[in-house]
Structure formats: structure tokens, C-alpha cells
Amino acid sequence: MADSDAIAPYAAHFTRPLADVAKDLESYAQLLRRWQAVQNLVSRETLNDVWSRHFADSLQVLKLLKAGDRAFLDLGSGGGLPALPLAVALKSPNHHFTLIEPNGRKVSFLRTVARELGLVVAVEGLRSDQVDSRETPVPDVITSRALAGLPTLCGWMQPFFGPETRAILHKGREHVEELAEAVPHWDFNVVVTKSDTDAEGVLLTLTDLRAKTVS
Ligand SMILES: C[S@@+](CC[C@H](N)C(=O)[O-])C[C@H]1O[C@@H](n2cnc3c(N)ncnc32)[C@H](O)[C@@H]1O
């Protein structure tokens, strides 16, 4: 199977030809392998399978986007997942990505990939709770994968939420417990979508996120 076969199911959502997206993702994969020697960016056992385990897993977010989604915010970007595959697939002057990642070496890696691939990406080298939401464009979409449990994530995401913002979150099978833990503290609407790439995983789409008022 060619590497690009793993991402072909999402090609209808790309802003440019599949071959161009695959070429940029191959450059990203090479940088991931090169930098992995000095900084753990993805778990070692997934490094030979980045196209399905990481790129397709990231790109499935595309199926849940709306036509007008332009501003993206990714919390806890690490090696750039899911934000960088999305930025590659949606490369255009109109789409803008902000990545939040406190680890200095990972920040250097993310900026290197963005520069080498010519992506419109801003990287904030801070923790989510240290970033001033008033200085950040109101996102249409917040993404996050493997960062924190949902109650903690709600606290970090809420300052960035505008009236139209949606969060599209990669979650594992523990999402049921996490939703139950978040509900006493947070109001939101949620849609659960089964993951294409992880038999036990889901994507949670949250809208109208608000802290519950204690009466
Ligand atoms: C397990 S990694 C996941 C990285 C990536 N999202 C992925 O799926 O491969 C979590 C990342 O979140 C970063 N992180 C930890 N605490 C954070 C915080 N409070 N705000 C933002 N990022 C944080 C860590 O440095 C790490 O790179």
C-alpha cells in the first residue's frame, strides 16, 4: 500500500491535490524521524506507521469541519498532531493555525516544519493556561489530542471559546467517564463520532462550552 492510500479517504476535503499534500506529509515524516533522535515526538512503536497512526488519525477531523472554518487552535501540539497534517491539507492564505506547546525543543521542531513546508502557523511556546486568549484570534475550531482529561481540557479551552467555536477532540475509550466527570462543572453540547483509525477511539465535538454557575 502506498503511504498516500492512508490519507486518500480525506482528499475530498483538501484545498489542493492529494499528491501535493502527500509530498508535504512525506517531508514532515522525514523531519519527525530525524528529530525523534533528540526529542521524543511520537511513541517509538508508531514511528514506522506515521501515515495511518498519525496522519490519517489527524486528518479525520476534516470530515467534521464546516465550509467557513478558517481559524484553528491546537492545545498541547507535541510533534504537531493533529494540527500540522490539518495545516498541510488546508494550506491556503485563508486558513490560520495557532499551536500551543510549552516544551522548547518541540516548539523548535514545530517552527522548523512550518518554515520548511511554508505553512501559516503560529507557535506559542507556553502552557495553555499561560496564553492570553485576548491576544489570540477567536478560533472556529479547537483541536487537542492526548493532552488532558476532559474536565481539565474544558478549563483550558473555555477562555478561547467564541459563540461559534467548536472543539473537536481526539479521545479514547475513557471518554464516557471523562464526559461524566465534566458534566457537573461544565455546560456544553456534545456529538460523539467513532474514530476511523482507532477501534476504541472517538472524536468529541463540543459546542457552547460554559462553566456551570454554582447557585
Ligand atoms: C502526550 S503529548 C501529545 C502531543 C500531540 N498532541 C499528539 O497527539 O501526539 C502532550 C503534549 O502536551 C504538552 N503539554 C503539557 N501540558 C500542557 C499544557 N498545560 N498546555 C499545553 N500543552 C501542554 C506536552 O509538552 C506534550 O508535548
Image (spheres, rainbow, N blue to C red):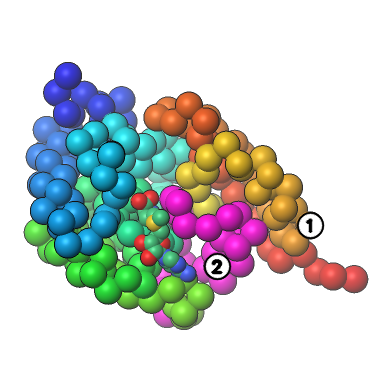
Q: Nearer the viewer, residue 17 or 2?
A: 2
Question: Quick check: is 77 in the magenta stretch?
Answer: no
Please provide percent x and percent y for residue 23. 10, 40
Please provide percent x and percent y for residue 68. 41, 49
Query: Separation of disc 1 and disc 2 at Cα?
Result: 17 Å
Does residue 211 lie above or below 166 as drawn? below
Query: Where the C terminus falls, by quadrant?
Result: bottom right
- Which residue carries the number 1 mark? 184
Q: Which mark is residue 87?
A: none
Query: Where the N terminus falls, by quadrant?
Result: top left
Query: Which residue occupies 48% across, 44% down?
Result: 170
Q: Horizontally, is 197 left or right of 13 in the view? A: right
One can see residue 15 in this view: no
Does residue 203 lie above or below 125 as drawn? above
- Label 1 neighbourhood size at 10 Å, few (<14), some (14-19), many (20+)? few
Helix or strand or loop: what does disc 1 sit on?
Answer: loop
Looking at the rendering, the stretch of residues picked out in magenta corresponds to 135-163
Q: Nearer the viewer, residue 150 or 208?
A: 150
Would the CB of label 2 be found within 8 Å of ligand 1?
yes
Which image quadrant for residue 10? top left
Q: Horizontally, is 32 left or right of 180 in the view? A: left
Helix or strand or loop: what does disc 2 sit on?
Answer: helix
